[in-house]
Image: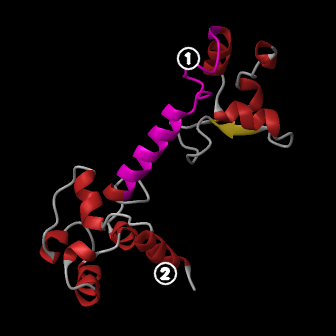
Amino acid sequence: MDLVSLNLQRGRDHGIASYTAMRSICGHSSITSFDDLQGIMKDEVIQEFKDLYKNVEDIDLFLGGLAETPLSDGRVGPTFACIFFDQFMRLKSGDRFWYNSLAGFNKKQRKNLYKTSLAGILCENIPELKEIQMWPLLVPSPVNPIYPCSFYNRLNLKVFKG
């Protein structure tokens, strides 16, 4: 068994919407025929889908999402990007301890959280780390320079004591 076959079976077992349905839910152009996939994925992939599926509306979400050409600034295509965005927004909004939430932190605590960054947190928690780029999840560049750990604000944990 492999991950692709497991994900396909999970999607079917749990009634996950098809690729074309999710694409429409995300507000992207409707797909009613295999020809509508032109420009969304490579021609050879479209041909594979024609060989595998009788109807374009039967394409599994996992395969269709993987087959899309990635967005210019991303690793996934528009359908998975939409799903990921929706999922993270729901996680953020549903988490009362999200630093922006009024329910989880008082004003002093939120102010302290606003002053910190992922780079600062990494510097505080990895003793061997002496310098890091401003946005650690992006490669260093002229717009994402590397600074010594002393550059970053430290989180004041005293404001979180009850």
Q: Magenta span covers which residues?
A: 80-107
Task: Residue at 22%, 56% (x, y): give it.
Answer: 24
x, y percent for residue 98: 59, 29
Mark 2 Cα within 10 Å, few/some/many (few <14, many 20+)? few
The first of marks 2 and 1 along the sequence is 2
Going by the image, does 53 lie left or right of 38?
Answer: right
Give the secondary structure at mark 2: helix
Which disc is residue 5 wearing? 2
Observer-nearest residue: 134 or 8?
8
Observer-nearest residue: 154 or 55?
55
x, y percent for residue 18: 30, 67
In the displayed structure, would residue 124 be above or below residue 36?
A: above
Task: Residue at 82%, 41% (x, y): give it.
Answer: 126
Which disc is residue 150 wearing? none
Task: Residue at 44%, 59% (x, y): give it.
Answer: 75
In the displayed structure, would residue 36 be above or below residue 139?
A: below
Task: Tell me if residue 147 is in the magenta stretch.
Answer: no
Which disc is residue 102 wearing? 1
Mark 1 Cα within 10 Å, few/some/many (few <14, many 20+)? few
- Display coloring: secondary structure
Going by the image, does 54 lie left or right of 45?
Answer: left
The quadrant in which residue 64 appears is bottom left
The C terminus: image quadrant = top right
Observer-nearest residue: 60 or 135?
60
x, y percent for residue 10: 48, 71
The N terminus: image quadrant = bottom right
Give the secondary structure at mark 1: loop
Observer-nearest residue: 70 or 95?
95
Residue projecting furthest to the bottom? 51
Can you see residue 85? yes
